[in-house]
Image (cartoon, grey):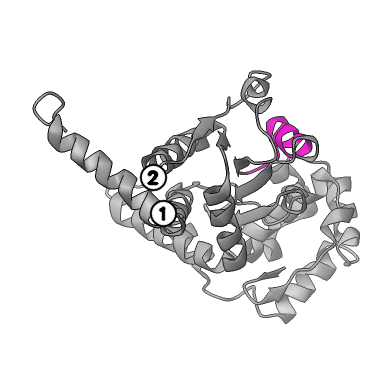
Amino acid sequence: MQMTGFQFQMDVSGLSRSQQAIANYIAGALQRIPYCTDEEIAEKVGVSTATVSRFWRAIGYQNLKDFKKALQQAGQSGQATPARKMEHILNKVEHIEADIVGELIEIASSNLAETAKRVERGQFVGASEALHAARKIYLHGGGAASFLTELLAFRLERIGLETQRLAASGSELLEGLMHAGSEDCVVLFGFVKRTPELTVLLDHRREAGYRTVLITDLLLSDMLEESDYVLQLDRGKLEGFHSMTAPVAIVEALTVAVTQRRGREGMDKLEKLHALRKRYAAQLPK
């Protein structure tokens, strides 16, 4: 994996969950690593210092000092990167006189620009085809991502696709999942970390045969290998403000792509909706 011109490569399959969490933190804070200690990284990620020490060896470096040297040789530590600019903007938001609207829009713009680089177009095409071909689309997103399942369902149902929102957490998830089969597709919004629910959804795929589309901000995770299609995006730094602008953009892009694939059938559904609105405008004003 390449990040801001620095080659940061590793065998994901050989990393533990804790080491993957460290890797994701580093990916989002690469410009600050030259000023960090193992102890500070351990505290940020919530692991032991010994785990951080073992991590460097797992990715091919002797220790943190060796990794910093590689960063410096690549010329990363002194660049005025978008990440540094965003950090400055976030600091300014602390002041009451700050232009919060302008600064948040700038943050969102940065997230979108990075997302445009991260999303592999072949994966996007495959994901849109999977949604188009599915008998039924199951949607899962916990926490702040729950509204994304509502938005995607709203958009897809308008063009004639059948959707079902799965429970965000707990065993209630299984009530809907039990009906998913080989003709279906499950869309997973997986941000920050792998949850038990995401593990169940990906594990059950092997038995049920449904295809999966993972929309995530994780740069490293074993979920990437376990999913049929992966759309990686940027929501900001791991320990900073997490914008939902990029996930919404991906949802909208998928909607347009699927509508295009459905052709006349999808447009007929939208025209039928328009006709119904006109017919019942007096009784049900918009």
Give the side of residue 81 with respect to residue 186, left or right: left
The magenta region covers 191-204
- Check if mark 1's residue and mark 2's residue have beta carbons within 8 Å: yes
Q: Quadrant of residue 169?
A: top right
Of labels 1 and 2, earlier in sequence is 2
The answer to whether residue 96 is seen in the rendering is no
Mark seen at residue 216: none
User: In percent of the image, x 70 and y 53: which residue is there?
Assistant: 24
Give the side of residue 122 with respect to residue 242, left or right: right
Mark seen at residue 259: 1
Image location of residue 210, percent across then percent down: 69, 41
Give the side of residue 138 with respect to residue 60, left or right: left
State the quadrant of the C terminus: top left
User: For this rendering, which residue is in front, 29 or 225?
Assistant: 225
Quick check: 211 above or below 138?
below
Could you tell me what secondary structure mostly forms the magenta stretch?
Answer: helix
In magenta stretch: residue 199 = yes
- According to the image, label 2 marks what residue? 159
Image location of residue 236, percent across then percent down: 53, 53
User: In percent of the image, x 73 and y 31: which residue is there?
Assistant: 196
Quick check: 38 above or below 2?
above
Secondary element at tag 2: loop
In magenta stretch: residue 120 = no
